[in-house]
Amino acid sequence: MGRRRQDTDRTAEARADALASVVEDLAGKFSLRPLLDRILRRSVELLGCDAGSICSVDETAGVYRKEADFGIACQSGRSFPLSEGMTGAVVAARTPVIFAEYSQVPGGHVGAADRATLHGVIGVPIAWRGSVIGTCIVFSRDPARIFTDDDARLLELFAKHAAIAIVNARMHEQLEERTRAEATAAERERLVREVHDSVAQGLAAVLVHLEGVAATGPDGAELAAAREAARGALAESRRTALGLPPSLLEGHSLEEAIGVEIAWARATGNLDAKLVVAGQPAPLTPEVAHQAFRIVQEALTNIVQHAAASSARVGVVYGPDELVLMVQDDGRGFDRNSESGNGFGLRGIVARARTHGGSVDVESTPGWGTQIRASLPYQPPESGDPAGSAAHRLRVLVVDDQAVTRAGLARLLAAAEPGVQVVAEIDTAPALLDAYRLLRPDVVLVDAYLGGHDGVECTRQLVAEDPGAAVVLLGARSGDPLVGQALRAGARGCVGPDADGPELARAVLAAAHGGITLSASVSDALPRPPAPAADGAALTVREREVRDLLERGLRDKQIAGRLSISVKTVEKHVGAVLRKTGASSRTEVAARAAR
């Protein structure tokens, strides 16, 4: 009696050890064949046999494939119809199947040499979520070995582990395929945009020269036809390249595309990342979906690369008039007033939202994480509103008489801010107005000392042509009175010759959205004219709100829209702000904030 008890204990211990070994094998392993070989070997040994096989099943196609065999040649790698063999019998029954002799198996595929040695055979389905995805089969060469229901239950335990191995391997394979496809699509997207930028700049230069010829010579039919052809080619290239959607949105919903990004964040950043969707999903235009996806993508990239967070949450909220995106993490956070609070990723998020007429609010506390809330209207503002006039990147016209400088500026902007596109490069002041009328860029970068035509005169001409023109002067020397004159003429920024790519990108983004930017080398040397004496009265709450928006460069109509008050009321508050602060003009209020 004691010996039988010891034998039973040893058998139970062997089963436990075998199952534990299988579980350890499954941890973090995605290569299917070695896993199935180990699972099969342990199940065969535990049943006291010396041969077996595992097959994968495709019920939709009506076939099964020999994936692994042990102690017997079962034609591994070949596929057979589900009407044949032990696997066919198990799938048809969808429960464990036992034959006393292998000769009873209909259409078995074991070779003649092995067939003569086989007796009992048992097979169980490998099931996953109600479907049979494979079978596990064990053969006995002992004529006295009779398989029982207990054997079937034990083999089913190994079949469950085989199911996990098969599903994990398939998911990993699909993920690798998707990763390769995404990398290919991203490279394609990058190449298309690079080609577009080069072609667009060339076409823009051709158009400018054609316009110049038309202004100084006879306008023949051939010249007119050339201009129209160039305009058409430029418009078509812009529609093709700038309308290119993110690869993940091709054939997928916004939530599905964001889900892939969240899976990437989990795997790459070891994050507990989740997606929450609220509201009644509304149909999104390709542009809204494009910008929303990119905003979430950039936010998650920032979290993985910089936040050192353990968890992240992405919320997609469908409101009555707008789509709201919430991305929050529990990472290190940052100080909004520091340089790190104005990182390129955050600037890109703000620029994307504003380009579509939306807004971004950021809350962050060092050591307590960050929350980004971006809202995108389902329909962008009317085309007359510069905040959301086009579904495109910010378009920049570069004006400098040095070819090397023009090329360097374009490269600096492209590296620092992907949302900025240089649409043309002009080398002379006389061609500036024609180029501006033709291209209508969002921002014009002008050399402060352009070939004898200083940037102040260029700024005056552009602002006279279009009061909303956003002009930024380049290379202004410290202490040069030209800077103050340019600001009074309507320039929205001046950057010194020591500006790098990020500083240049900040100036472009600020100018495009109504702000004023002065680089440190320029602002520190600005002469400080005597300011009118302030009356000493404290600003009211509403006046402080108006002052904050003035500092961001917003006009009265934009301030009225933000605060839901009339333009007349805004004008009254602006006057009070100027009187109480002692500022001589709105530009001085913005310049103080920039300094």
Image (spheres, rainbow, N blue to C red):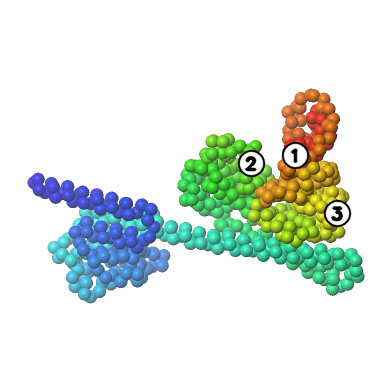
Q: CA distance from mark 2 to mark 1?
A: 18 Å
Give the number of the disc on residue 453.
3
Inspect the image, locate mark 3, and give the three-letter code of the amino acid beneath it: His
Dot 1, how many residues are within 10 Å of its Cα: few (below 14), some (14-19), or many (20+)?
few
Disc 2 or 1, which lies upstream in sequence? 2
* Nearer to me, 313 or 146: 313
Q: Is residue 519 visible?
A: yes
Secondary structure under the numbered disc 1 in the rendered image: loop
Farthest residue toward the bottom?
A: 112
Dot 3, how many residues are within 10 Å of its Cα: few (below 14), some (14-19), or many (20+)?
some
Relative horizontal placement of residue 203, taking residue 464 as reference (left or right): left
Inspect the image, locate mark 1, and give the three-letter code of the amino acid beneath it: Asp
In the picture of the structure, the residue carrying the numbered disc 1 is 524
Secondary structure under the numbered disc 2 in the rendered image: helix
Inspect the image, locate mark 2, and give the three-letter code of the amino acid beneath it: Glu
Q: CA distance from mark 3 to mark 1?
A: 25 Å
In the picture of the structure, the residue carrying the numbered disc 2 is 339
Q: Quadrant of residue 306?
A: top right
Q: Nearer the viewer, mark 3 or mark 2?
A: 3
Residue lying at 85% horizontally and 64% vertically, measured from the top left: 211
Q: CA distance from mark 3 to mark 2?
A: 35 Å
